[in-house]
Image: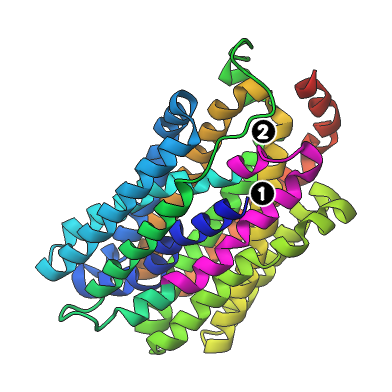
């Protein structure tokens, strides 16, 4: 379990680094300001497009070989990013972002690997412990970005070389991982058709919850460094502290998620996530001072934690053990497709609709999910679905 935690922290450091500096690099590097967030968006597209192939590879070869190969791909992607900055190739930097996203699909599978290490009763605690690695990644990525900013003659080229080192250490750690399965699936059926599984109320609500978590978070988070540094004139250090605080807030509530789960249940945590998202967006609309950026991003991180972890823990109620790889990969494909659209739209909304218009889109998305949650009875079916899965 702890191997997964530390490997997760190091392998996801590239995400926090790209969030901090890719948009800033893009404003000076891209053909137009509307394309400034394209490298980040392509990273998310990489995640979305790799989820289904990754699921098939996991099913055929198991987790450990796939984790190792994807770590090697991440190292190559970081090297391509550094070389592209030196050679002034925006297309190469975009390719590096895509490859980093593709390799990150394995990192997102770490949470399901954690669930397989424990019994169903300990699942909330397992996902909480794993996501603590995200707190470490919140510091590793941005610190490497700032430390390597002027390490080479080309600004930020050294940052990606340091990131390649982080990926290498993560590769060494994850190479010691061993797959754990409680049940032997060799002689079981392939499970129900996917179209039937995706009509399950718990699966629908789980996917929508995680999609909202990533969609709104990516929409606002991707635009924040550009809005802070370029539009509001705040320093890179101030921007870094806001992004780090946001990422810490994404993962710190994991310490008490299992306790909150036992006290309020999934429905209570989902409503809490919706309320916190609305509070975050309200703060972002008030003003564009440092404290407003900081508070809105901290609230955004907490809301993401509640919505994403609730969706992750709700999903297994909708599938049987032999269906896990198919459903997990489709879940990630749909969730990260929404994130990709949000990342692609973030720069466009910021450029054409400004900060307030972008925040308004987040409000509409959150209220739409609130309506779904209000009328949904998916959580009421979890007990009977769990009995079905175990049978």
* Colour logic: rainbow
Can you tell which quarter of the image residue 180 is in? Answer: top right
Q: Up-down: is 193 above or below 350? A: above
Residue lying at 62% horizontally and 10% vertically, measured from the top left: 187
Q: Position of residue 22 (x, y in %)?
A: 32, 68
Side of 37 relative to 264 (left or right): left
**Residue 45 is at least partly visible in this image:** no
Q: Which mark is residue 203?
A: 2
Q: Along the line of sight, which residue is nearer the eye, 216 or 328?
A: 328
Q: Is residue 133 magenta?
A: yes
Side of 312 relative to 263 (left or right): left
Q: Along the line of sight, which residue is nearer the eye, 287 or 238?
A: 238
Q: Up-down: is 101 above or below 60? A: below
The prevailing secondary structure element of the residues shown in magenta is: helix
Instruction: Residue at the far left: name it.
Output: 87
Magenta-highlighted residues: 112-141
Q: Position of residue 129 (x, y in %)?
A: 67, 56
**Residue 52 is at least partly visible in this image:** yes
Q: Is residue 7 magenta?
A: no
Residue lying at 32% horizontally and 48% vertically, measured from the top left: 72
Q: Which mark is residue 292?
A: none
Q: Along the line of sight, which residue is nearer the eye, 384 or 290?
A: 384
Q: Position of residue 154 (x, y in %)?
A: 17, 78
Q: Position of residue 361 (x, y in %)?
A: 53, 60
Q: Which mark is residue 369?
A: 1
Helix, strand or loop at label 2? It is: helix
Task: Assess disc 1: are there few (<14), some (14-19) or many (≥20) residues with their C-alpha within 10 Å of its C-alpha.
Answer: some
Helix, strand or loop at label 1? It is: helix
Q: Along the line of sight, which residue is nearer the eye, 36 or 15?
A: 15
Alpha-carbon distance for marks 2 and 1? 14 Å
């Amino acid at each position: 379990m702890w191997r997964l935690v530390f490997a997760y922290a190091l392998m996801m450091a590239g995400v926090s680094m790209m969030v901090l500096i890719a948009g800033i690099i893009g404003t000076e590097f891209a053909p137009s300001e509307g394309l400034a967030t394209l490298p980040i968006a392509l990273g998310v597209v990489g995640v979305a497009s790799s989820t289904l192939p990754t699921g098939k590879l996991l099913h055929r070869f198991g987790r450990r070989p796939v984790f190792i190969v994807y770590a090697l791909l991440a190292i190559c992607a970081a090297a391509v990013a550094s070389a592209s900055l030196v050679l002034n190739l925006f297309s190469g930097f975009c390719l590096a972002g895509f490859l980093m996203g593709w390799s990150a699909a394995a990192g997102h599978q770490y949470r399901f690997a954690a669930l397989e290490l424990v019994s169903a009763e300990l699942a909330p605690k397992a996902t909480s412990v794993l996501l603590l690695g995200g707190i470490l990644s919140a510091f590793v990525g941005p610190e490497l970005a700032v430390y390597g900013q002027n390490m080479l003659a080309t600004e930020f080229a050294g940052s990606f070389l340091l990131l390649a080192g982080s990926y290498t250490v993560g590769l060494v750690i994850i190479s010691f991982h061993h797959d754990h399965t409680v049940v032997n699936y060799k002689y079981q059926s392939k499970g129900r058709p996917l179209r039937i599984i995706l009509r399950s109320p718990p699966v629908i609500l789980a996917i929508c919850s995680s999609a909202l978590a990533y969609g709104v978070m990516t929409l606002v988070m991707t635009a924040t460094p550009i809005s802070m540094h370029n539009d509001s004139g705040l320093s890179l250090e101030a921007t870094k502290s806001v992004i780090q605080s946001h990422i810490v807030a994404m993962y710190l509530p994991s310490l008490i998620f299992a306790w909150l789960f036992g006290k309020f249940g999934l429905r209570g945590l989902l409503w809490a996530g919706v309320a916190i998202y609305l509070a975050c967006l309200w703060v972002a609309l008030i003003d564009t001072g440092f404290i407003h950026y900081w508070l809105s991003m901290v609230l955004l991180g907490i809301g993401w934690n509640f919505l994403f972890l609730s969706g992750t823990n709700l999903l297994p109620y909708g599938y049987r053990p032999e269906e896990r790889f198919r459903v997990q990969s489709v879940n990630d494909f749909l969730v990260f497709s929404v994130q990709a659209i949000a990342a692609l739209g973030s720069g466009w909304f910021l450029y054409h609709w400004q900060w307030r218009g972008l925040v308004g889109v987040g409000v509409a998305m959150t209220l739409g999910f609130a309506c779904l949650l209000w009328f949904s009875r998916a959580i009421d079916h979890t007990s009977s679905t769990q009995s079905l899965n175990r049978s």
